[in-house]
Image: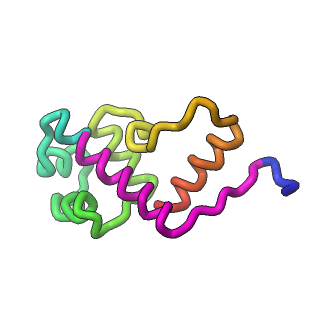
Amino acid sequence: MNSAIGIVLLSMEQVEEQLHYVIRRIKEIRREKSISQLELSLKTNMSQSFLASLEGGKKQPSVLTLLRIARALEVSPKAFLPEIDDKKTKDEIKDTIINLIRSL
């Protein structure tokens, strides 16, 4: 592979697992902070039904949606992503992040 950043191909199952992880983290963090879906909807200017659909796995968040939710919950967007193995190289970490973003 001659590109500066190698592409890691993920199976659809892996993409789905990562997406479900992100959605679970949104819900976990919201609950840890004792914020209702209604409160989050007001803070993000998103409908409560959209947030319920998102948390229920019926909708997929865009990057902008993740950024708005992170800001409203006062966390870094990284809080929604799976922990990265410290033994991975920077290129492997970049690949993981790129693939997560592509899967959204």
Left or right of 104? Residue 60 is left
Identify the residue shown where x is 19% and y is 35%. Answer: 32
Left or right of 90? Residue 55 is left
Q: In the picture, which quadrant includes the N terminus?
A: bottom right
Q: Position of residue 87 (x, y in %)?
A: 63, 31
Identify the residue shown where x is 44% and y is 43%. Answer: 81
- Colour approach in the figure: rainbow
Foreground residue, 51 or 21?
A: 21
Residue 74 versus residue 47 in the image, above or below: above
Foreground residue, 42 or 51?
A: 51
Q: Which residues are magenta?
A: 5-28
Q: Position of residue 26 (x, y in %)?
A: 29, 46
Residue 18 found in image quarter = bottom left
Residue 48 versus residue 97 in the image, above or below: below
- Specify the principal SS of the magenta part: helix
Residue 20 versus residue 31 in the image, above or below: below
Identify the residue shown where x is 23% and y is 65%. Answer: 53
Identify the residue shown where x is 39% and y is 37%. Answer: 79
Q: Magenta segment: does it hold 19?
A: yes
Q: Position of residue 30 (x, y in %)?
A: 21, 41
Left or right of 43? Residue 63 is right
Q: Magenta segment: does it hold 24?
A: yes
